[in-house]
Image (cartoon, grey):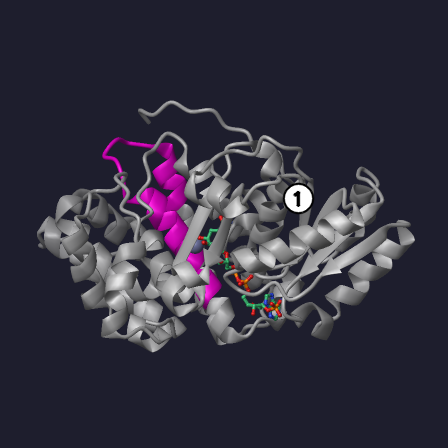
Amino acid sequence: MLGNFSYCNPTKLYFGDDSLKFLKDELKKYGDNVLLVYGGGSIKKNGIYDEVVAILGEAGKNFAEVAGVMPNPTIHKLNEGVAIARKHGADFILAVGGGSVCDYCKALSVSVNYDGDPWQKYYIDFEEPDCETLPVGCILTMAGTGSEMNAGSVITYPEKKLKIGHVFADEKIMPRFSILNPKYTLSLPHYQMVAGIYDIFNHICEQYFSDEDDSTTDYLAEGLMRSVIHSSRIANENEQDYEARSNIMWSATWALNTLLKKGKTTDWMVHMLGQAAGAVTDATHGMTLAAVSLPYYRYILPYGTAKFKRFAENVWNVNPAGKTDRQVAEEGLQAMESWMKELGLAMRLSELGATEDMLPDIANATLILDGGYKVLTKDEVMQILKESL
Ligand code: NZQ
Ligand code: ZN
């Protein structure tokens, strides 16, 4: 390990099938005016909404609601939430949902007391908040993004065809607490479950495919990847398997709570390509990543062959005997491809509604980062997108 770093993660986690019982005591730490934020209605169907509202009542909270936070939450929805939060005099935000709701609540946290345009400040200029921010707590219903224990917040501006994530530097933007009950994820449709699983896996890849030093962080990443592959196969056969679903939920949190980037540079180009595709198509986040991954990794493999070989051997159990490094590395990606197909992930952008004429917009919305094995040119971005179509 050659990198230098500091590490602090202040989010308190409550994990398990009884974890909601800790909500009441957590709520005591914050003011009486709670803003309850949720998505398109899944929490009303599976009963989580009723449970949470009962606890808010028992805790004597005065709450207002922001309902209908959509997957890939928009800036317009954010502005609507800011108005509701101000009218209510909110002093605490409770997110109940997946990554979209949790991300949205962080965006609200930094916008309620800011008088200017949050899109410009946080998503174009990437500034940190200089106003008072509101504390956020999270009750997670979908495993994937890691938003429950990080300071990331992704917002989409549909008319501008931009979807941009800001990872806030200030730790107080992270949820103060997150309640992780694997049972809550059991009502997820299969499509969302596997999209979340691939999101987890790719978060690990984004932090693994960089650098050449011997780093403990990479060994942690390999262990997490093996666990995700193992549990995903069980959950794919039986979605109601609590043990597999709880492992998936726990892996999701560790895949993106800043641990796996410690002492490393990071790549994140699959996310840049996938997010750009999401901005143009509004497709499910994890599926956009799946669709661009193999063309991207096959393209950069010659620039990072040693790491792709290690990935093949340590994550996919490829036997290197009698093979060149390149052959071993390629076999690892073949094993990954088979696993992705087994789960039923989207393997092409065209499956997500993308068409050839959209590719220039997607290429244009793709931010090019320089932490991976190859800094792409705009032409290479276009080439990878064409291969992903
Ligand atoms: O809206 P409802 O009705 O709740 O339905 C949701 C939504 O349709 C449904 N769902 C969630 N929990 C459910 C459920 N349905 C039944 N039962 C449950 N228990 O699932 C659908 C997808 O939910 P969403 O929150 O959009 O999914 P996800 O957790 O994948 O979040 C995606 C968003 O997070 C961002 C993505 O870009 C995207 O905007 N990301 C955030 C990151 C971060 N904060 O660090 C990093 C990620 O890479 C990602 O970019
Ligand atoms: Zn992701």
Answer yes or no: is residue 198 visible: no
Q: How would you rate the neighbour count of disc 1 (Cα within 10 Å): few for under 14, some for 14-19, many for 20 or more?
A: many
Q: Nearer the viewer, residue 362 or 41?
A: 362
Residue 348, how many percent across, how many down? 29, 72
Q: Residue at x 69, y 68 (%)?
A: 43
Q: Which residue is mark 1?
A: 112
Residue 262, how many percent across, how many down? 41, 32
Q: Would you say 59 lies left or right of 88 here?
A: right
Looking at the rendering, the stretch of residues picked out in magenta corresponds to: 195-222
Q: Residue at x 47, y 57 (%)?
A: 156
Q: Nearer the viewer, residue 380 or 3?
A: 380
Answer yes or no: is residue 157 visible: yes
Q: Would you say 295 lies left or right of 16 here?
A: left
In which quadrant of the rendered image does the N terminus lie?
A: top left
Q: Residue at x 74, y 56 (%)?
A: 36
Task: Check if residue 213 falls in the magenta segment.
Answer: yes
Q: Is residue 121 above or below residue 302?
A: above
Residue 382, how many percent across, how many down? 19, 60
